[in-house]
Image: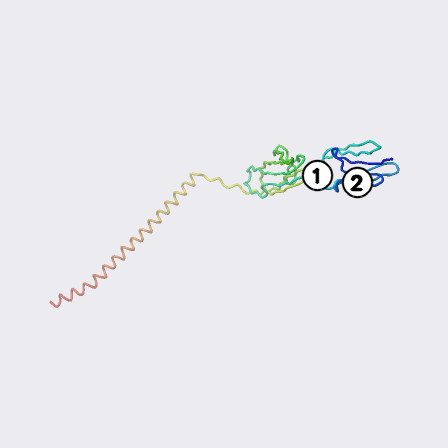
Amino acid sequence: MDWTVLIWNINQYSVLTITKQYGPIVNSNRYMAHNYTTTTSFISELTILQTERSDSGTITCILQNGGQMNASLSVQVNGTLQIANQGLSVLQNTQTSILCQANGWLPKPTITWMVNGSAVDSGKYSTRSTLTSSGLYDMTSTLAINATQNVSVACLASIPTLSQPLQANAFLTVTKTAPVTNFPTVLVAVVCSVCGALLLLFLILLILLCCKRRKRTSKQFYIYFRVFPITSSVTNCL
C-alpha cells in the first residue's frame, strides 16, 4: 500500500504520527508503533506503555491517503481484595457472617465465594457496590455460613482483563457448643456457696472465742495458786 503519513489518535487526540520518509514523530514516550508491512499487506501496531484510565475510548488509525479505521479500548483497573475477619473462631452450628472487601476496581468486579474449594450458591451471600469520587468501585460482599466443622473460605474478584480471579483466603475454626446452664441450678449453687462461707466464718469466730476464754481462765488459776500459799503461811504464824 502506498502511504505517506499515518496518524494514531486516542479520543480524537493525536498521540503518534509516522511518516514514510522519516519514521515516527514521537508526541509522548508512552506510545510506540511497530510496522509489520509485507509485500501484500500493510500492518501498523500501536503499543501503549503504562496504560492510564484516560486511554479508554476510541482508537483511530488514519492514513493520509487511505482513509481510517476505528477500534475501542477499555482500560480496566484491578484493585485490592481482602477478607476483613481472616481468623475466625465460632461455636458449632452458629451462623456467622464473613466480610470480603474489594476496593478501587473498574469496572465492577464479579464477587464469588468458595468453601473448602467448592463454589457457594449466590443465594448465600450478598454484594453491594459504591462508586467513589475517583470513579472506581468499592465492593462489599457478605457470606452467611453455618459451619459444623473447620472450613477454609475464599473470596474471589474478577474482571474481564484478569486471566485469573484475585483471591483472598480465611480459615474458620469451629468449636464445640458450650453447655446450656440452667439458671435455678446456678442460683442454688451460689446460695450454697455463700452459706458455706458464712458457716465456716462462724466456726472460725467460735473457735477463736473459745481459745480466748480458755486462755483467760488459765491465767486466773495461775494467780490464785501463787497467792494461796502466802495466805496460809501468815495464818500459821499467828
Mark 1: which amino acid? Answer: Glu
Q: Residue at x 40, y 43 (%)?
A: 190
Q: Residue at x 28, y 55 (%)?
A: 212
Q: Residue at x 25, y 59 (%)?
A: 219
Give the quarter of the image for residue 83. top right
Mark 2: which amino acid? Answer: Ile
Say whether residue 232 is left or right of residue 146. Answer: left
Can you tell which mark lies on residue 25? 2
Which is nearer the eye, 95 or 42?
A: 42
The image shows residue 21 at horizontal and vertical percentages of: 85, 40
- Distance from disc 1 to disc 2, alpha carbons, whole Å, reads 21 Å
Tag 1, which secondary structure?
Answer: loop
Say whether residue 168 is left or right of residue 21. Answer: left
Can you tell which mark lies on residue 52? 1
The image shows residue 189 at horizontal and vertical percentages of: 41, 43
Tag 2, which secondary structure?
Answer: strand
- The mark nearer the N terminus, 1 or 2, is 2
Instruction: Residue lying at the far bottom in this picture: please name it.
Output: 237
**What quarter of the picture does the C terminus occupy?**
bottom left
Give the quarter of the image for residue 162. top right
